[in-house]
Image (tube, coloured by chain):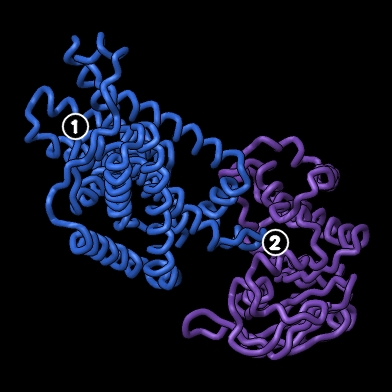
Chain colours: A purple, B blue
Amino acid sequence: MLRLENVQAGYGNILAIKDVNLEITQGEIITLIGANGAGKSTTLMSISGVVPIRAGRISFKDQDIHRKEPDEIVRMGICQVPEGRHIFPQLTVQENLDMGAFLRKDKKEIKQDIDYVFSLFPILAERRGQDGGTLSGGEQQMLAMSRALMARPQLLLLDEPSMGLAPLVIKQIFEIIKQINIENNTTIFLVEQNANQALHIADRGYVIENGKIVFSGTAESLLKNTDIQKAYLGI
Amino acid sequence: MDYFIELFLGGITRGAIYALIALGYTMVYGIIGLINFAHGEIYMIGAFTSFIVATVLSIYGFPLLAIVLIAGVAAVIWSSAYGYTVEKIAYKPLRHAPRLSPLISAIGMSVFLQNYVLLAQTSDFLPFPELIPEFAFMEPVAHIIGSSDIIILITTAVIMIILTVVIKFTRVGKAMRATAQDRTMAMLVGINVNRIISATFIIGSALAAIGGLLIASHVGQINFYIGFLAGIKAFTAAVLGGIGSIPGAVLGSLVLGLTESFATGYVSSDYEDVFAFSLLVLILIFKPSGLLGKAETKKV
């Protein structure tokens, strides 16, 4: 469904990703794990078209997307929940969700989808009229994911959804990720530092170091790999 | 008491006009964090366009109302085209440059447009046709407020209401607010940010053009340099109210207009600018973010 071939990208003089190759098939959950600054977020930003790539090729459903504008990429069905959630602070919860459906015109179904995300995260229904900036970290993460779902993505890119959250909330977020994957058949590309949790819900995983993919395999094989255990799982 | 009321209403009128220009500064700043110093020139171009169109139409003997409307529409379209083009030429290529670069580019654009109008038109003051007549029904209050003041107030009020509705409820308005709050995220929900930035420049320029028409007809003369002082004043008003904030720009403009009006009326018109800019200095010392602005916090 999504394929990255020899992708290079960066900011200014810094090359944040040097050689990234990966592939996602329809319906999977895959995870990309790596340390701070390894190039995880840059990888997602180049898929979304926010950071232009310097070399290589990104294709989605056999169509090159690396020269497309971010809004065209969203229109094709790729949505991202960026690191740090990026809630619009002075828009209400409802308006934040409306922004998620920005490219859609089907009013009736948008309303259904709002009810759907409220069923996933009932707390958001209570906070409906509140400004996004006043929510707690966990609530903001729920809102950020709901906002992405409002676009009915085929591929959902999640950047560190567990960052800065309490263990109980993390558990809830991961359960919902799995639920979204199963219920809507949404393909999920999960970037995490919390490798243990991520590998437990993922089908396959990639490990990135210094801008290069150094290891890939099924989630089980990554969990059993002693190098990865030492470096990322704290065992 | 009549004198006080006269000064008060005069101040509000002044403020209303500043607001039309200040909104352009504040909206552009809100979206791309740039002080568009060429904005005063867009206002001046609006005044010139309406001057040319109004003069031609009055030669052909059009009725006054038609002249005002056609000149207004022409000024709005022409100024918007300039605003749009200025952004595309002078700011868009510098989108990812350090913040100082587009600022210098803006000052360059301002100087260029002034001199361009100077060369293409004239350096003399041109008498602007009186587009707003003295209404008969205004006779009893004419010593307090003129007909053109009333027209300016009503026009500005209507425009403010329309602008508020557009920003609050329409798709493009919501996209503008989202882009101002978080540009990266705006891209990620599928907003074409370049188009929103263009829309902001067009709306700001259109407001400035209407301001140009109203002031020119109120004051009665124009030249290529009027954009500079009006621009500086409106910029002051925007900073006073809190740059980036739309209600702030309106409030700041009214405060500035009233200050100038009272300073002129009770002290001397020579001190008008002294009071206006002293007010700015005081606000910047005691409330640097402006009356309604939010203190900017930057994560380090």
Using the rendered view, name the quadrant where residue B281 is placed.
top left
**Circle 2 marks a residue in which chain?**
A
Q: Which residue is mark 2?
A: A81
Q: Amino acid at mark 1?
A: Glu
Q: How dense is the environment of label 1, judged by Cα within 10 Å: few (below 14), some, or many (20 and up)?
A: many
Q: Is residue B78 left or right of residue B121?
A: right
Furthest residue to the front? Answer: B60
On the image, the x and y values in percent for residue B234 come to 29, 43
Instruction: Give the residue pinned by disc 1.
Output: B260
Horizontal arrangement in the rendering, residue A183 relative to residue A215 (left or right): right
A19 up-or-down from B71: above or below: below
Q: Is residue A188 above or below residue A99?
A: below
> How far apart in space, not on screen, are marks 2 and 1 (Cα)?
50 Å
At 39% from the left and 57% from the top, the residue drawn is B83
Q: Compare residues A220 and A206 and report the one nearer the observer.
A: A206
Q: Could you classify mark 2 by the number of other residues whose Cα lies within 10 Å: few (under 14), some (14-19), or many (20 or more)?
A: many
* Residue B11, percent from left and from top: 24, 27
